[in-house]
Image: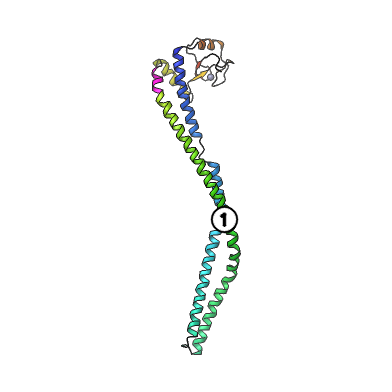
Amino acid sequence: MDSPGLQRLWRLHEIDSGLVEIRKRAAALDPGKVLMADLRALENHYEATGVKALSSELTDLELKQKGFEEKIKKIDKELYSGKIVNPREVEAFEKEKDMFRRQRAELDARVLELYELVPAATKAADDIKKKLDAKRAELGDYQKRVLKEQERLKAEFSRLSAMRPEAAKAIDPGLLVRYDAIRNNQGGVGMSKVTKLSTCEMCGMKLPVKSIEIAKEGRVVTCEACHRILYFTEGLI
Ligand SMILES: [Zn+2]
C-alpha cells in the first residue's frame, strides 16, 4: 500500500526528475555540428577552386595590358601628328613603343592561360556555391528546429518549476530534508520504484525482501546500492 506521505513525495520526485530530464535534453541539444562541419568543408572546397585569386589576377593583367596599349596609342598619336620630324626623336618614340609592346606581350601567355583557368574555376565554384546555399538553408532550418525545441524545454521547465513549491510544501519537513539530501547526491533523482523483479528501477540492484516489505507498507526505506528512497506501487512496472 502506498502511504499518502510517500505518494506526495513521489509526486515531488516526478517533478524533480522531470526537471533533471529537461536539463539533460537541453544540454544534449546539438547546434548542428555535422552540418556546420559540412559547411566548412564546402567553404574550403570553394576557396580551393582559386576562383577569386584567378579572376582578380586576370582583371589585373588585363588592366596592365590596357595600360600598355594606351601608352602605345598615345605614342602613335604623337608620331602621326606631324609635329615630330626629328629622326632621333622618332627613333626614341619607336623604341619606347617596342618596349611597351614587349611588356604587353610578356603578359599574353599568362592571360591566355587564365582564359582557360578562370571559366573552369568559375564553373567549379558555381557548383560548390549551389551546394553551399543548400547546406546553409539546411543548417538554418535545423537551427530553427533546435531553437523551437529549446523554447519548448524552457516552457516545460518553467511549468514544472512553478509546481515544485506547492508539492514540496505537502511533504513532512524531516522527510523533505532527507529526500533533498539524497537527490543532491544522486544526480537530482531521490526516489526509485521497486520493479516486478524486486529490483531498484534506478540502479538495477536486487532488493532484499525486508526492504520491499517496508516499502510495501509505505514506510521510508532506501536502496542499499544507490541510497534512493524506494517507492512500491502495485502493477506499474
Ligand atoms: Zn538503487
Taking the magenta stretch, the answer to whether it contains residue 165 is yes
Q: Identify residue type, mark 1.
A: Asp
Q: Residue at x 61, y 64 (%)?
A: 116
- Name the element at disc 1: helix
Circle 1: is it few (<14), some (14-19), or many (20+) Cα within 10 Å? some
User: In the rendered image of this protein, does residue 71 appear above or below residue 213?
Assistant: below
User: In the rendered image of this protein, does residue 49 appear above or below residue 27?
Assistant: below
Q: Residue at x 47, y 36 (%)?
A: 148
Q: Quadrant of residue 162?
A: top left
Judged by its main secondary structure, the magenta piece is: helix
- In the rendered image, the quadrant that contains the C terminus is top right
Residue 90 placement (x, y as % from top left): 51, 86
Residue nearer the viewer, 181 or 20: 20
The residue at the far bottom in this view is 86
Residue 11 placement (x, y as % from top left): 45, 19
Q: Residue at x 57, y 72 (%)?
A: 106
Residue 161 placement (x, y as % from top left): 41, 26
Q: Residue at x 54, y 65 (%)?
A: 58
Residue 111 placement (x, y as % from top left): 57, 68
User: In the rendered image of this protein, does residue 93 appear above or below residue 105?
Assistant: below
Q: How is the image coloured?
A: rainbow
- The residue that label 1 is drawn on is 126
Mark 1: is the Cβ under 8 angstroms from ligand 1?
A: no
Q: Quadrant of residue 195?
A: top right
Per the rendered image, the range of residues in magenta is 164-170
Taking the magenta stretch, the answer to whether it contains residue 63 is no
How many marks the image carries: the answer is 1
